[in-house]
């Protein structure tokens, strides 16, 4: 999905990246938070969170509903202030000073139903300092670029829910933000529009824009993110590259042998279990080579052997615990 303004005119003082891989390496931080805390009526919703989001990265806040994701984003944006801790956004201690360079799509979607689609986009841009006339021009052009040109003059009330969500998304981007914040952006979207949004987010990062989004869907975080913060119960037990999170769990080995028994069995790790025709176990710390040697010398007759790296779901369970993982899986699609 082309983004004519963001992808053609955005300049961050860094050359646009071609890939998101390693986006955090040697880059200044778009967002930095240290020890931020937020309490509501004695309840601690966010409890001492630290975040470091590199410029140009796609960064995910991953956790179940009610974990503190929305509260964290609102503190970062300056919508609410932390009770403790500090935050720094695009080099500024006061988020409002750089509000015109930030795009924010809240979880609560809402547009004035009597506005025409292109006017709604222009209005959202005007809230971020974009002249209204320029916003109207860009609004029409963006709608055309995204296959919605025919709906430019339709009122929001005349649009489907999915179309209205796309209009609000374009309004979030019309002023060429350097930082885009999405709160549960995939909520309510069908599979087709989820795919479009994923491509758009990758395009933003490739043009140098920093993208941070919250989600309770592991698949989105695993496909998109350079780095994630796993959040549960208002705390962040892990924040860093997705690969580092996955490496918290040793790769799993799946072995099939011709021989059912023999001296080679002694070489299998203690956690090896037999399921059907396969042996399943964690990759030994010594690596696969000593095991292969023992299997060959013991005439096990290797029929197949595969090594599978742990997924982000397994990493989430190991880091946040079974209860948080269950809450993640039970999070309703439309819930906060």
Image (cartoon, rainbow, N blue to C red):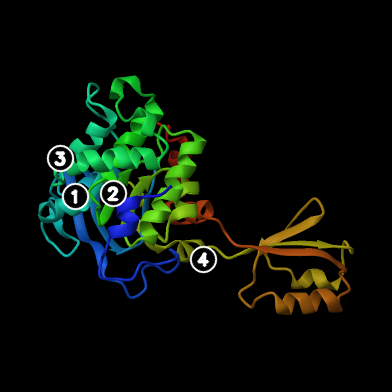
* Label located before the other in sequence (4 or 2): 2
Mark 4–mark 2 Cα distance, whole angstroms, equals: 27 Å
Give the residue at mark 3.
132
How far is disc 3 from disc 4 in space, using C-alphas?
A: 49 Å
User: Is 294 left or right of 16, judged from the image as shown?
Assistant: right
Q: Position of residue 277 (x, y in %)?
A: 82, 54
Calculate the distance from the C-alpha at mark 1 to the C-alpha at mark 4: 32 Å
Marks 4, 2: nearer the viewer: 2
Q: Nearer the viewer, mark 2 or mark 3?
A: 3
Horizontal side of residue 324 vs 99, given as left or right: right
Please tell me whether mark 4 sits on a helix, a strand or a loop. Answer: loop
Where residue 47 appears, as percent x and y from the top left, is 24, 52
Eyeballing the image, is 231 above or below 144? Answer: below
Numbered mark located on residue 77 in the image = 1
Which residue is at a point 15% across and 40% down the rendered structure image? 132
Q: Earlier in the sequence, mark 1 or mark 2?
A: 1
- If you read the primary sequence from the N terminus, does the residue marked by circle 3 or circle 4 appear first? 3
Compared to residue 335, the image places residue 314 above or below, namely below
Point 46% across, 35% down: residue: 330
Q: Identify the secondary structure beneath mark 2.
A: strand
Marks 2 and 3: CB-CB under 8 Å? no
Q: Nearer the viewer, residue 293 or 183?
A: 183
Q: Residue at x 39, y 46 (%)?
A: 63
Looking at marks 3 and 1 on the same chain, the residue that comes earlier in the sequence is marked by 1
Disc 4 to disc 2: CB gap under 8 Å: no
List the residue tagged with mark 2. 181
């Amino acid at each position: 999905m082309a983004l004519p303004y963001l992808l053609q005119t955005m300049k961050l003082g860094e050359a646009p990246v071609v890939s998101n891989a390693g986006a955090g390496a040697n880059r200044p931080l778009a967002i930095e938070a240290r020890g931020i805390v937020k309490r509501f009526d004695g309840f601690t919703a966010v409890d001492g969170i630290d975040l470091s989001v590199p410029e140009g990265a796609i960064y995910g806040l991953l956790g179940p509903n009610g974990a503190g994701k929305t509260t964290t984003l609102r503190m970062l944006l300056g919508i609410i202030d932390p009770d403790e801790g500090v935050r720094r956004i695009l080099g500024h201690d006061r988020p409002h000073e750089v509000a015109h360079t930030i795009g924010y799509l809240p979880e609560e979607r809402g547009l004035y139903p009597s506005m025409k689609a292109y006017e709604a986009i222009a209005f959202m841009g005007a809230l971020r300092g974009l002249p209204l006339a320029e916003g109207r021009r860009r609004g029409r052009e963006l709608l055309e670029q995204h296959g919605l040109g025919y709906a430019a003059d339709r009122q929001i009330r005349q649009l489907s829910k999915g179309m209205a969500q796309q209009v609000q998304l374009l309004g979030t981007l019309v002023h060429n933000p350097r930082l885009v914040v999405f709160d549960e952006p995939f909520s309510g979207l069908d599979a087709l529009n989820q795919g479009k949004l994923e491509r758009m987010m990758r395009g933003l990062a490739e043009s140098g824009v920093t993208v941070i989004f919250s989600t309770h869907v592991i698949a989105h975080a695993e496909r998109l993110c350079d780095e994630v913060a796993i959040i549960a119960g208002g705390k962040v037990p892990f924040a860093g590259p997705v690969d580092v999170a996955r490496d918290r769990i040793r790769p799993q080995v799946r072995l099939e042998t011709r021989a059912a028994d023999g001296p080679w069995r002694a070489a299998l790790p203690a956690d090896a279990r037999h399921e059907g025709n396969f042996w399943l176990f964690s990759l030994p710390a010594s690596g696969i080579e000593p095991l292969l040697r023992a299997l060959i010398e013991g005439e096990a007759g290797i029929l197949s052997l595969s090594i599978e790296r742990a997924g982000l779901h397994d990493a989430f369970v190991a880091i946040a615990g079974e209860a948080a993982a269950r809450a993640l899986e039970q999070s309703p699609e439309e819930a906060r």
